[in-house]
Amino acid sequence: MKEYYVYIMANKSGTLYTGVTNDLERRVLEHKNKIDGFTKKYNITRLVYFDTADDVTAAIEKEKQIKGMLRNKKIELIKTENPLMVDLS
């Protein structure tokens, strides 16, 4: 069974990036190596949250839900799993 990931990356000043992927390790490395435009521009290199889904539709729905949250709600979500917001990668 294929697994999909919804994830949130952050930089030191707290800028957040939410994404979805079927290969979390590869995608995080792309962010750390500054492949992506937004994450490159804002130096977003820390994986602070991720969740799994069994199908891509559920993962995309969760991503949309997170992207629609206010910033403080995103921080609350992250801190439920990662209270110190350390790099999980």
Image (spheres, rainbow, N blue to C red):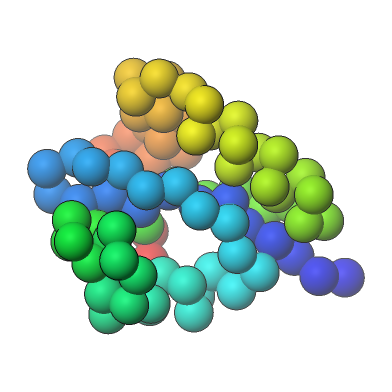
Q: Quadrant of residue 15?
A: top left
Q: Residue at x 23, y 67 (%)?
A: 40
Q: Residue at x 48, y 23 (%)?
A: 69
- Residue 27: x percent and y percent? 47, 72
Indicate the quadrant containing the N terminus: top left, top right, bottom left or bottom right: bottom right
Indicate the quadrant containing the C terminus: top left, top right, bottom left or bottom right: bottom left
**Of the pair 49 and 71, the residue shown nearer to us:** 71
- Residue 71: x percent and y percent? 34, 24
**Of the pair 84 and 9, the residue shown nearer to us:** 9
Question: Is residue 14 found left or right of 7 in the rendered image?
Answer: left
The total number of labels drawn is: 0
Question: Is residue 49 found left or right of 21 in the rendered image?
Answer: left
Question: Is residue 23 found left or right of 48 in the rendered image?
Answer: right
Residue 76 appears in the figure: no
Q: Residue at x 32, y 77 (%)?
A: 35
Taking 74 as reference, is 85 above or below it? Answer: below
Q: Residue at x 28, y 49 (%)?
A: 10
- Residue 76: x percent and y percent? 40, 23
- Residue 17: x percent and y percent? 37, 48
**Of the pair 17 and 53, the residue shown nearer to us:** 17
Taking 77 as reference, is 49 above or below it? Answer: below
Q: Quadrant of residue 4?
A: bottom right
Question: Is residue 86 found left or right of 8 in the rendered image?
Answer: left
Residue 67 appears in the figure: yes
